[in-house]
Amino acid sequence: MRKAIFLDRDGTINVEKHYLYRIEEWEFLPGVLDALRLFQEKGYLLIILTNQSGIARGYFTEQDYCKLDDWLQKRLAEEGIEITRTYYCPHHPEAKVEEYRQNCTCRKPEIGMFQQAVKEYDIDLSQSYAIGDKIRDLAICGVSNCQGYLIGENEEPSVIDAVKLGKESNVQVRKDLWSCALEICEE
């Protein structure tokens, strides 16, 4: 079995922007490239799981999303970083675009994308980590022994406080992806 880092995208890898899909608006968060490199050096698969309701809302198309994701893969490859796979959910229960209007099992906090990755890549959750800027990005931690890190300042203060008090199982609060990488990789 293999170990993985499950990464949210917006607010974890890049600066959170309102329904980001334009390459020229992409901005890596500080320390992200070094963190991804360190995870990779320690043998972790790098898997991105991202809700992309902007597709369902009609703000951009699935092709627009794929164009940005292709660019990201190439940009990271230039840095020697390989993303094993990106999973994305284009659905939303109140979608403007009818084909994406549904309650699905892939939209976080549902764990469908996690389950698909575990199955496809034979991942051992007990040796894996989920990292994101919203508690929904860590949903797998509540139903498995996967450890989680809530990072940044995009979550509600009450949720951050609950995590700090240990009310969310297997989840800790850290400043950013780099601090998570230092902690995980020194274990």
Image (cartoon, grey):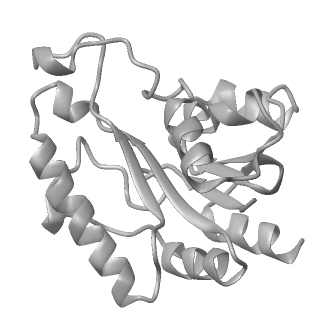
Quarter of the figure with the N terminus: bottom right
Can residue 96 be seen here? The reply is: no
Q: In the rendered view, would you say 120 is above or below 99? A: below
Q: Position of residue 16 (x, y in %)?
A: 36, 50
* Residue shown at 60% from the left, 66% from the top: 45
Q: As drawn, is 46 to the left or to the right of 53?
A: right
Q: As drawn, is 117 to the left or to the right of 99?
A: right
Q: Position of residue 19 (x, y in %)?
A: 23, 41
Q: Position of residue 35 (x, y in %)?
A: 60, 75
Q: In the rendered view, would you say 40 is above or below 55? A: below
Of 141 and 153, nearer the camera is 141
Of 89 and 157, nearer the camera is 89
Question: Residue 178 is drawn in which quadrant?
Answer: bottom right
Q: In the rendered view, would you say 125 is above or below 31? A: above
Question: Residue 106 is drawn in which quadrant?
Answer: top left
Question: Residue 24 is drawn in which quadrant?
Answer: bottom left
Can residue 20 be seen here? The reply is: yes
